[in-house]
Amino acid sequence: MNGSWKSRFQHSHTRTLLFGFVTGLLVFIITQSLILSSPFALLASGSHFAIARGKKNKFASQLSTAWPEVIDHLISGISSGLSLAESLTGLASRGPEIVRPAFHEFHMQLQKDGDFSGGIQNLKTYFSDQSSDQIFEAIILSKSLGGNELMSILRTVGEFIRQDVALRKEIEIKHGWVKNSAHLSAAAPWLLLLLLSTQPGTVNSYSTPTGALILAAGVGMTALAYVWMNYLGRLPQIPRVFSR
């Protein structure tokens, strides 16, 4: 699991650099100016990195909405007479799509060495999510102590997760249009510059040391404004209590 995440990280950064290079090359072909194409290459790389992070955040959001369904599958499996291990491994084929690969790995590990607790710890490490931590800790506690309250605990945890997901979705919808407006405001000056760069006078103006300084300041201010906007609009993450 760790290797797959490392591979994804490396591929993501390679794509970011490649996207910036291609964008800079296209702008250079249009303007025939290295000074004008360099800021666009940097901004393109930064925007691609931001989009990649947005996809990661979207994955985390989709994952959080999957846990109530996971709990429902576990409760249904246990109620039908399946063991806890069978209910968990069944998620590899019947669970939400987003969690199936991880539970397939859990199933394979369980068949290989039968280490149930170790498999649960690997799942916790893979998901690294406070909602999943609560579920897996309840499972570990029930497995070790032989408790009969697992169903009740899972129902309670599922209700808490549903309430949290509903609240976060409502907040994200309200803040979404503000973020989109900020993204457009950050991109508009550079799109205008790209249009103006087709004029020889614009290229000559920015080919001077003063013009290069203005471009550098523009890149810095755009990046700073974007980072600050995302910081202000970021929802606080609930800390993981059972991270170990």
Image: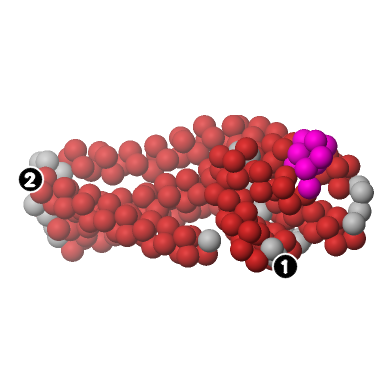
- Camera-near label (2 vs 1) is 1
Do we see residue 42 in this rendering?
no
**Residue in the picture at 38% in, 43% down:** 186
Our reading of the magenta stretch's main secondary structure is helix
**Residue 151 x, y percent position in the rendering:** 86, 43
Q: Residues within 10 Å of mark 1 (few under 14, many from 20)?
A: few
**Residue 129 x, y percent position in the rendering:** 66, 54
Do we see residue 33 in this rendering?
yes
Asked whether residue 34 is drawn in magenta, I would say no
**Residue in the picture at 25% in, 38% down:** 192
Q: Is residue 32 above or below residue 82?
A: below
**Residue in the picture at 70% in, 65% down:** 115
- Describe residue 148's horizontal placement relative to residue 29 as left or right: right
- Describe residue 151's horizontal placement relative to residue 85 as left or right: right
**Residue 212 x, y percent position in the rendering:** 21, 60
Residue labelled with disc 2: 200
Instruction: Give whichever of 82, 242 is nearer the camera.
Output: 82
Instruction: Give whichever of 208, 129 is nearer the camera.
Output: 129
Quadrant holding the C terminus: bottom right
| Secondary structure type for disc 2 | helix
Looking at the image, tell me whether mark 2 or mark 1 is earlier in sequence order: 2
- What residue span does the magenta drawing correspond to? 74-83
Q: Check if mark 2's residue and mark 1's residue have beta carbons within 8 Å.
A: no
**Disc 2 from disc 1: Cα separation:** 61 Å
Give, as a three-letter code, the residue at label 2. Answer: Pro
Instruction: Give whichever of 23, 180 is nearer the camera.
Output: 23
Give, as a three-letter code, the residue at label 1. Answer: Arg
**Residue 116 x, y percent position in the rendering:** 72, 61
| Secondary structure type for disc 1 | loop
Q: Give me the disc on residue 244.
A: 1
Furthest toward the right, the residue is 148
